[in-house]
Image (spheres, rainbow, N blue to C red):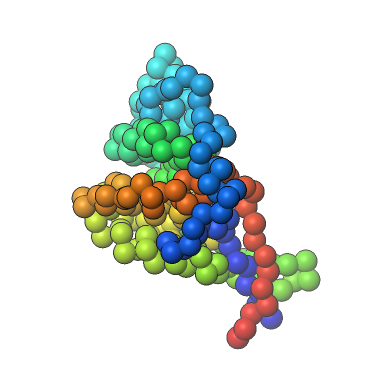
Amino acid sequence: MINKICSSSIAPQSALPPDKKASTAEQRAIAEPAANADHVKLSGHALMLSRLFGQDEATYTGKVMTDRNSTTTALVPYLTGEDRAMLEKMYDYSVANGIDLRHVDALGGDLAFYRRFGASSGAHDLFDTEGHALAFEFSQTDKAYAERIADNSATSTIDQGFLQSELVVGGRGTNFAFLERMTEVFSSQPKDIPRANQAPIAALLQQVPAAQSRAIPATS
């Protein structure tokens, strides 16, 4: 028997449908600043250096690694110059919109992994405690996000190969709600997102709960 695991990203995908109003708790979350907002406003560049590289201007060299045969365990040095410039802007955007910066951290980590090792093949060769093979599948909410991300990818300026890799089941740590927003913002045809439509997503992205997954008996 093959069991299926309903896989979610680092934050469970619980965004409200467009036609559903935010709950009182969500409205309160929108009104409050993000949990990890910096007391002193830092630039996207400074945030990227600190959060992804663990460095500052005094120690950062900007070197980009390209040798995939290297024995280094580091991933972020493989981010290209274009990747880093984009991530800086994502940090700036997230600060300005009250989005938890850990979403940018996760996307940056996924992108660095992609640059280092190539496209994700997803999770495989996994078994439960009784020896049954496990398969991964998206939750219904994640499926909807994935479809919209795929639709946005045609005009997104985010690396196309990376986006396809992110859509592999079990192959990423990035929150799909956040990734969808980034494909809309970083686009050759950026969408004008009405502020009213940003409220539910802002509430969702202000917190990053622990990852959750559950085994589901296969139907076939």
- Give the image quarter of residue 92: top left
The outermost residue toward the right is 130
Q: Going 55% across and 42% down the picture, which residue do you hit?
A: 29
Choose between 76 and 204: the one closer to the eye.
Answer: 204
- Image coordinates for residue 65, horizontal then vertical, percent: 38, 35
Choose between 13 and 31: the one closer to the eye.
Answer: 31
The outermost residue toward the left is 188
Choose between 69 and 190: the one closer to the eye.
Answer: 190
- Image coordinates for residue 19, horizontal then vertical, percent: 43, 64
- Image coordinates for residue 178, horizontal then vertical, percent: 44, 49
Residue 163 visible (yes or no): yes
**Quadrant in which the N terminus appears:** bottom right
- Image coordinates for residue 190, horizontal then vertical, percent: 25, 50
The outermost residue toward the bottom is 220
Residue 74 visible (yes or no): no
The outermost residue toward the top is 58
Q: Going 38% across and 24% down the picture, which residue do you hit?
A: 43
Q: Going 32% across and 50% down the picture, which residue do you hit?
A: 194
